[in-house]
Image: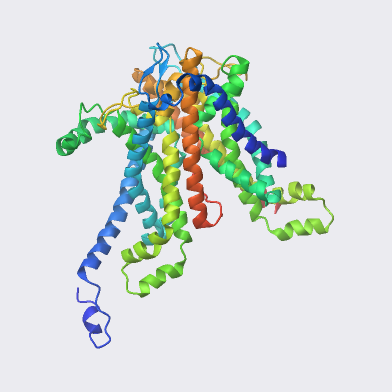
Amino acid sequence: MPELAPTFAGPHAVPPISLRRRITDHVMTGAAIATVVLVLVPLIAIFAYLVYRGIGSINWAFLTQTPKPVGEAGGGMANAIVGSGLILGIASLIGVPFGIGAGIYLAEFGHNRLGSVVRFTADVLNGVPSIVIGIVAYSIVVLYQRHFSALAGGVALAIMMVPTISRTTEEMLLLVPQALREAAYGLGIPRWRTTLSITLRTATSGVITGVMLAFARVAGETAPLLFTAFGNQYWSLRYDQPTAALPLQIYTYALSAYDDWHRQAWAGSLVLIILIVAAVSAVRYVVRRGTFGAA
Amino acid sequence: MTVCGLAVLGVLGLIVYELMRGSGLSWHAFGFKFFSGSDWDPVNEHFGALPFIYGTLVSSLLALVIAVPLAVGVAVFTTEMCPKALRGPLSFFVELLAAIPSVIYGMWAMFVLVPILSQYVQPFLAKTLGWTGLFEGTPYGFGMLAAGIILAIMIIPIISSITREVLMVVPQHQREGVLALGATRWEMIRMGVLRNARAGIMGGIILGLGRALGETMAVTMVIGNRPEISKSLFASGYTMASVLANEFSEATGDVYLSALVEIGLALFLVTIVVNALARLLVWTVTRGQAVRGHA
């Protein structure tokens, strides 16, 4: 490589970078690229395999029928899809108001010691294993109701939603310019009204995005549902009965010994991923259009 | 709003209270021996949690050993080396990994990873590294090694997204300064960037550890679920989260249930400590700015 080195020869020349250092540089660059490849390979493998096995297995029966008895081919996961919707609905009803409320508290009133404690608690709560939250939901709901239920599953997922929602809500509210709040105060609007009608409204799309992130995160959760919602082979739309959920059904079928159930587990996984992605993008789309319309 | 803020504290309090109440019976029966006994015998109501603690620690550490170099490599590549056009899609893809429900990881591991391990990887490891004693026994595929690998795939996005955030906080003039002294790019990254971001990267790693410790579904599906302590990574194991997933809803007898809740309590305390430590480390680097993009 007859590049720069010779032309710099002179009394004040910078010594050329030694071969060893140059090789190290190239080796480390190569190593970094190699790590990217190594990380991307399983990702692509998982997605490709999921789509490959899933697409071949989704059919009309899968989406509209309930499971067949053990060993019989056919049937579907319709009850699990609806059950997941029910559990997630309950979870959102409980978790979203509390999460947003806590976020508002942190952003607008939480600049003191108690606020920092709540903030830290929310972050720590975010890391509590989901199965432990399942135990708690079991002991506060299932033990009182005396049987497994959709409500218990909903409570478990709600507990998991709160920290995520509150932290993103806080972040979004803090992005709202202070001048906007001051303008509202200047017009004599009380603080609570300003928070609800001005600050929260301005940050709506961000807050909803946070809610959807939390939703997507708990939608695929299996562990906290194992001994709260428990699963069910039949239709159930009651909040106080054991309820099927898509992730639970996938788990049960994946561990079974039947090829047909394995096939359905893959189909269920694909449906689950599609539902999660669809829910998130739909709300994002609506929100973006809504705010543009208002502006 | 303050009520919602306090509710976050309340939830944490509730978790602690319920876990302590539920585990009282087992605590009185076994005391500290619970954590040092390796006997798990539901029939005679004799419980020791050591095999589960061992399984959790070994599988999580194995995951870290695999994940940390890869995750840090990806983060370094995306912040320091990658062409701008590639940066967005690359981090999007890596974060997509975080959106896959863990039950789907588990299923992929069961049907794809485990056969590959038992047919190719484990025989190879046994032949070349068998003398270490870490790779002995029948290559079933299922076991500690499979659990460690799938955990690694699951925690790479967390570690790498936090590492990326931390690397981006390192001031630009640090990089320019080191480059001006004649460093190659790798030397600049090593001395100017990584050294400054040490604490934050450590935080990201510990956060990944916290996630690995509590991960339930994927591990349960591939680790083999046998409460034994074996030096070989080919052997089956059992983790604290897995035993809860498998036995909690079937536990007969108060002491059995109580022993399981005590495992839950131990798992909760460990993850709380690990997470609090991680948050503090990340906070010292990013100075209290909320770190986004983690699970």
* Quadrant (top left, top right, bottom left, bottom right) of the N terminus of chain A: bottom left
**Res B249 visible:** no
Q: Kindly identify the residue that appears in the image at 31 percent across and 55 percent down.
A: A32
**Res A109 visible:** yes
Closer-to-camera residue (A108/B94): A108
Q: Is residue B138 left or right of residue B292?
A: left
Place of residue A132 in the rendered image (x, y in percent of width and height, measured from the top left): 51, 29
Closer-to-camera residue (B206/A269): B206
Q: Is residue B221 above or below residue A34?
A: above
In this rendering, the count of numbered labels is 0
Q: Is residue B24 above or below residue B8?
A: above
Q: Is residue A263 above or below residue A125?
A: above
Place of residue B27 in the rendered image (x, y in percent of width and height, measured from the top left): 49, 23
Q: Kindly identify the residue that appears in the image at 59 percent across and 33 percent down.
A: A159
Q: Kindly identify the residue that appears in the image at 79 percent across and 47 percent down.
A: A193
Closer-to-camera residue (A272/A136): A136
Q: What colouring does the structure picture have? A: rainbow
Place of residue B154 in the rendered image (x, y in percent of width and height, measured from the top left): 40, 39
Q: Kindly identify the residue that appears in the image at 35 percent across and 43 percent down.
A: B64
Place of residue A76 in the rendered image (x, y in percent of width and height, measured from the top left): 46, 20
Q: Is residue B240 above or below residue B185?
A: above
